[in-house]
Amino acid sequence: MKRKAVGLLNRIQFIDLAQAVTISRLLRKEWLRKYLHRAVDGGKFPSYRHFRGAIASIYGVTRGLDLSPPVDRESLEKHIRIACNGVDEDINVDAALTLFDLVRPQNYLAYDHPPRNLPLGLKRTAAIGLELYLVKDQSPIFQFPFPRRERLDDHTITILLSIIHHAYSTDDFEEARVELADLSCDFETSAGRRDKLPRVRCPRIVQLHRDNLISMDDLAPEIQNVHDLLLELGDEPEPT
């Protein structure tokens, strides 16, 4: 169990980490226990790997002497379907086309950017997975595409974008704004969040305002607590 807990810690999804930080310390251990047991039991986490692999093409990243035009919608769908080869195909295609329809009308300029990771402990990091930046009206933007159908609550979004800000809005990009390209589904009421997800995505772009930024002094202890709890859970017996 310890080995599996450490393995999960080494590859925890950045979004899941942000959600774990949102959970109160009183309830966090049980939330992480369920998360860990799902992984140990071989539960399949749907993968958006091929969607993530196409993000640079969707935004039309400019690369040196490459003068080829940005990928069109039809070619994008064909590429994703071939890459998925039937595995999680529908969710990857749906997310990719939704992002395409959301961002292409914005006429962003897009450029490669070295990925930044979030330190979790000795030789352990959580990959944020953001490998480009945008420019619009001469202003740099770090925009994180969120492909899942479940809509995050506002506090989780603030935590997620705050972490991205601290990792990316540094040095020459100190004034860059941070956004979420949210591809999730909406709900008519807050009570409906527990009901079955609607079938239609309701994409939007959410910007982190500086007044809402959570400091790393506040985030770091909570991230460390997630790290420590996962290691504690590794000492528990495997579920039967």
Image: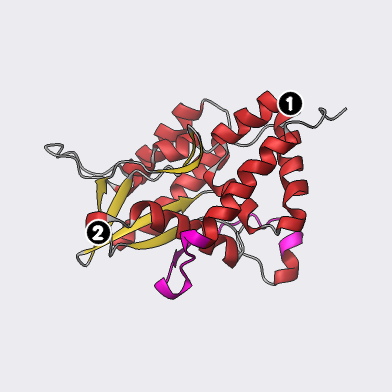
Amino acid type, residue under disc 2 in the picture = Val
- Residue shown at 52%/25% (left/top)? 85
How far from the left and from the top, in percent, is residue 100?
Answer: 39, 51
Gap between marks 2 and 1, in whole Å?
45 Å
Mark 2 or 1: in front is 1
Q: Is residue 150 magenta?
A: no
Rendered view: 61 above or below 143: above
Tell me the magenta residue range.
193-217
Disc 2 crowd rating (10 Å Cα; few below 14, some 14-19, many 20+) is: some
Identify residue for label 1. 1
Rendered view: 65 above or below 194: above
Camera-side residue of 85 and 165: 165
How far from the left and from the top, in percent, is residue 101?
Answer: 40, 55
Q: How is the image coloured?
A: secondary structure
Q: Is residue 204 magenta?
A: yes
Identify residue for label 2. 135
The disc placed on residue 78 is none
Task: Give the quadrant of the N terminus.
Answer: top right
- Residue shown at 53%/54% (left/top)? 220
Amino acid type, residue under disc 1 in the picture = Met
Furthest-right residue in this view:
240
Of helix, strand and loop, which one carries label 1? loop
How far from the left and from the top, in percent, is residue 82?
Answer: 45, 27
